Amino acid sequence: MAKFTLQVNGQSRTVDVAPETPLLWVLRDHLDLVGTKFGCGIGQCRACTVHIGGQPVQACMTPISGVGRKPVVTIEGLSADGTHPLQKAWCELDVAQCGYCQAGQLMTASALLADNPKPTDEDIDNAMAGNLCRCGTYLRIRAGIHRAAELATASNSKEAAK
């Protein structure tokens, strides 16, 4: 066992775990952040996607020892009050069906929008290609990302006008 101090959703958190413990289990079992889901355990479905240093990664394949000092953001840290443009768009368009994969979908989509605020269908399809949805809501996910981009642009325009 070893002590690791992480910056998770803007808070410093210390855990005492084996260095090879996957970040997924640290988040869920030690920090009680259960929004990040276990899907396949082999990095193929991306249900466990979180951001490390602003980049989407699969928490099931990332050992705690590999995080270092980079900040970690989980679905709980995307927006404390549900006002992130993606969260608004997902609700507005009823994107989710069963919802199991949606935390990973949202985290991947938020990284995309941070890098590319006006993605094309092709940009979205490429960025989201590894995120599996057993319910097949891919077209609604794409529409949700486009809508979130619109909401973010409108919000930025209002802020600039102030």
Image: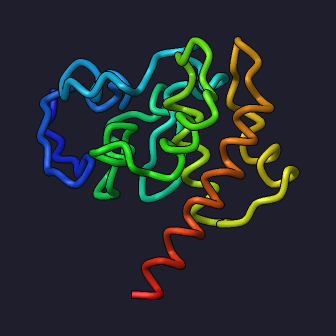
Residue 63 falls in image quadrant: top left
Residue 40 is left or right of residue 8, and the answer is right
Residue 130 is left or right of residue 55, and the answer is right
**Residue 44: % across, % down:** 67, 23
* Residue drawn 37% across the image and 40% down it: 74
Query: Does 21 appear above or below 157?
Result: above
* Residue drawn 45% across the image and 35% down it: 62
In the rendered image, which quarter contains the N terminus? Answer: top left
**Residue 159: % across, % down:** 43, 79
In the rendered image, which quarter contains the C terminus? Answer: bottom left
Viewer-side residue, 8 vs 62: 8
Residue 9 is left or right of residue 159, and the answer is left
**Residue 92: % across, % down:** 57, 37
* Residue drawn 51% across the image and 35% down it: 49
* Residue drawn 64% across the image and 55% down it: 112
Residue with the most extreme right position: 122
Viewer-side residue, 57 vs 2: 57
**Residue 132: % across, % down:** 70, 23
Query: Does 98 appear above or below 32?
Result: above
Q: How many marks?
A: 0
Viewer-side residue, 103 vs 43: 103
Residue 117 falls in image quadrant: bottom right
Query: Does 131 appear above or below 101?
Result: below
The colouring scheme, among rainbow, by chain, secondary structure or one colour, is rainbow
Residue with the most extreme bottom position: 161
Residue 159 is left or right of residue 16, and the answer is right
